[in-house]
Amino acid sequence: MKTIAYYISDYGFGHAARSVALIRQLLKRKKDVRVIICHSFALHFLRESLKGENRVAFRTIETDIGYVLRKDSIEPDVEKLNVEYEKYLTKWPLLIERERNFLQTNRVDLVISDISAFPFEAAYTLGIPSLGISNFTWHTAYQVLIADRLLEPLKEAYEKMTYFFSLAGSKEPDWGMKGTKQFGFFARNVDSNEVNRIRQLMNPNGEQFVVFFGLGMKIDVGQLEHLPIWDSPNCMFIVSSNVQVKRPNVFAIPKDYLESQHYIAAADFVISKPGWGIVSEAVCARKPLLILERQTMKEDQNTISFLKTNHLCKTITWDELCQFVINEEFIDELQSQHTHDGGFFGNQTDIISKEILRVLRTKNERI
């Protein structure tokens, strides 16, 4: 039995959801693989999503700090982020030493991280191959928010990745001692029967325009209730369970519902912040996107640039969203402009899982 230690960023649900897609496929393709998930924020979601998989173990561990957002805003609080990051750096040597002990004790064959940095340091010191998979690293994400001299530990750790699987929209340097491989989008699989059930629930007469409105589970924007968008004619809205908007045409996904990709697939249109997870699920489901701009986040700008280049989205600022109403003219324009290449922009979960297993097979090659 081969053992993979799979580290997942603690920032939001997007990293966890896309990791579920890959872990499911890895377990399906290979019967002699076990996975130890290392994570804290969305651990309940991960446990429930992988319930019944006896080759998955869960370890509660804080993997990174992510972003710190200003109250009632989608923008980062730079001052607070710097405070949290400097606290994080004081623990850096202890984090690495703890992971060395964990990897040795559990006889780990491969470290995968999406995209916490310290596991790469620990794996490198033990000669264990490691694989980073992401559309960004925290080193580049923090570059406009935190002083470069403070980012050196992250940079040095990412340089010790054996492989880096770079995802759609990434503008990362060529990380990985054995190089970087490029991939597109991937997401959890969709059950067409479940999508049809949701469509029937949301739009039984087929006369409504169904909009998925996703700002992410970590965003707390108090003024959402007063947005004029909810008054858009002939529109039904799907929102995450944490969005407190009480309207007859607004449906909140139940808190205990895990497979939110089905609601995205059931929608006609997706409005979202540029988080890669929800964007990927929308692209894989061939849904037109309206993306909320966030100028201060490099990761977001890279994703938006990629989507625009490939005619997969329109963008809107927060101020514009505060005045935005969906009308027939907008719907017609959106549907006429949206294009989708079912090849490169299809779900690449299977392709990526095969590449991971190839890395696992060749783990004894000299790093």
Image (spheres, rainbow, N blue to C red):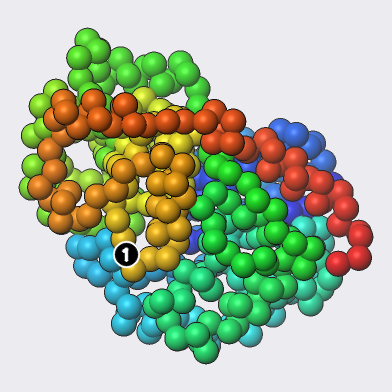
Above or below, 314 relative to 199:
below
Give the total of numbered labels: 1
Q: Quick check: 346 left or right of 1?
A: left
- Residue 68: give x, y in percent of width and height: 35, 70
* Residue that extends furthest to the right in the rendered view of this protein: 365
Depth check: give the residue in front, 222 or 51: 222
Residue at (53% x, 73% y) in the render: 139
Residue at (59% x, 31% y) in the render: 343
- Residue 264: give x, y in percent of width and height: 38, 32
- Residue 13: give x, y in percent of width and height: 44, 51
* Residue, disc 1: 295
Q: Quadrant of the C terminus?
A: bottom right
Q: Amino acid at mark 1?
A: Gln
Q: Quick check: 273 left or right of 351?
A: left
Depth check: give the residue in front, 23 or 300: 300
Q: Quick check: 163 left or right of 316?
A: right
Crowding at dot 1, Cα within 10 Å, few <14 / some 14-19 / many 20+, comes out as few
Residue at (40% x, 59% y) in the render: 301
